[in-house]
Image (spheres, rainbow, N blue to C red):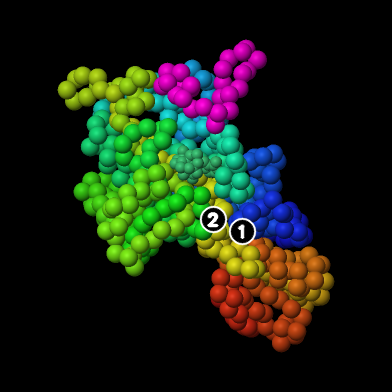
Amino acid sequence: MRLSRYFLPILKEIPKEAEIVSHRLMLRAGMIRQQSAGIYSWLPLGKRVLDRVNAIVREEQNRAGAIEIMMPTIQSADLWMESGRYDDYGKEMLRIEDRQKRAMLYGPTNEEMVTDIFRSYVRSYKSLPLNLYHIQLKFRDEIRPRFGTMRSREFMMKDAYSFDIDKAAAVHSYNKMFVAYLRTFARLGLKAIPMRADTGPIGGDLSHEFIILASTGESEVFCHRDFMDFEIPGDDTDFDDVAGLQSTVDRWTSLYAATSEMHDADAFAAVPEHSKVSARGIEVGHIFYFGTKYSAPMKATVTGPDGKDHPVHMGSYGIGPTRLVPAIVEASHDEGGIIWPAGVAPFDAVIINMKAGDQACDAACEQVYAAMTAAGLDVLLDDTDERAGGKFATADLIGVPLQVIVGPRGIAAGEVEIKTRSTGERETLPLDAAINRLT
Ligand code: ATP
Ligand code: MG
Ligand code: MG
Ligand code: MG
């Protein structure tokens, strides 16, 4: 991508409504634009990062055996009347009337709809287990949307829903998502700790929130420090190994970790003083087992091995990609701007032409650009006529992992510079050696 033909609306002024660093940086880097309170457009740079986050989320859902579908954003109120949640959900639900005067709503979550899909097709326990997920916009009329896309009204959610014949099978489905979440957050460069959580309006009795420690987090959390160094399950994890998954989950729930709603001061007091972490956190994921809460009233039953009808045992599993992007920025930035972990970076490298229009600089930039692109890398070439200082600032701000700096003095000596954004390390190399290194 040539920056001269791209759309990267960098903001020079720090917008004053942005209270936290991720919100400021995402606005400055031209990633998002607020369209009305808590409703955002994703601009090209932001869209690239969001797509990469979603790709990782999707890969780990698929690896754990979940199957992707796509449900609509607009739902009929009828289903919510069946489950009894239409009245309970309150003002967070955006209620809409269509031209036929039918009660509709913009989905804040999809338990009812997916239960309806399930009951329409699945008849026998032999079709279980089943886990269906989608990555789709949600709307919740948050009383206080803030912090950019961290708490917005329209936001993206990956929501998965599992169906099993009984509680034991449902717990295995829960454990699959638990492990998939550990892997997902680790691949995003985040240390997320599963914490015992309240089930809230979703209902049920087994639930964990995945929390990232951050001073700007909205939740108050308490946990054992050792979680920070726990080993993440590998990509060779066998998701069908019931006992193996259970032991991974047991280990990850063996130490104290709870949000303020579930906090037990006496239990926390037993944690050794130097291992106590009492901090703020960002909820990036939340998983629930809620049994037959929806399947019973909505009559989602299957025939069991005993020939009788049983309401299915369900769980739901949410991750917020549009919250994860700012959460990653909160966890990974410096005074100069964002530092993207390689897995989610919008580009692999940016080539900075310090003197666009200079024949030797232009030629070297084109050569590096062509070689890296041919090697399958995603490269941004800053071929604009801005001054070098501004280009360096932009490259640091947008946080691409590698910067290839091409200037007239270096090129006269046949050399270019490679800067690693995360460490600030710089290395000067002959052009050919640099191309070798980069491809
Ligand atoms: P919160 O406590 O922050 O209001 P929640 O508990 O209401 O979140 P869940 O119903 O558990 O959210 O939804 C699953 C995930 O969706 C959350 O863990 C979070 O990552 C994301 N999410 C929820 N609400 C928002 C929001 N307003 N903006 C962005 N992401 C959100
Ligand atoms: Mg909420
Ligand atoms: Mg919550
Ligand atoms: Mg939650």
> Which of the labelled discs sits on residue 21, or is there none?
1
* Residue of label 2: 216
Residue 323 vs residue 395, the one in the foreground: 323
Q: Earlier in the sequence, mark 2 or mark 1?
A: 1
Instruction: Evaluate if marks 2 and 1 touch, with contact meaning CB atoms under 8 Å apart.
Output: yes
**Mark 2: few/some/many CA within 10 Å (<14, 14-19, 20+):** some
Q: Is residue 134 above or below residue 269?
A: above
Image quadrant in which you'd find residue 167: top left
257 lies left or right of 201: left
Please state which amino acid type lies under the numbered disc 2.
Thr
Range of magenta residues = 80-105
Please state which amino acid type lies under the numbered disc 1.
Val
Q: Who's the residue at 47% across and 55% down the image?
A: 280
Image quadrant in which you'd find residue 1: bottom right
Horizontal and vertical percent position of residue 415: 67, 83
- Verify whether residue 78 appears in magenta: no
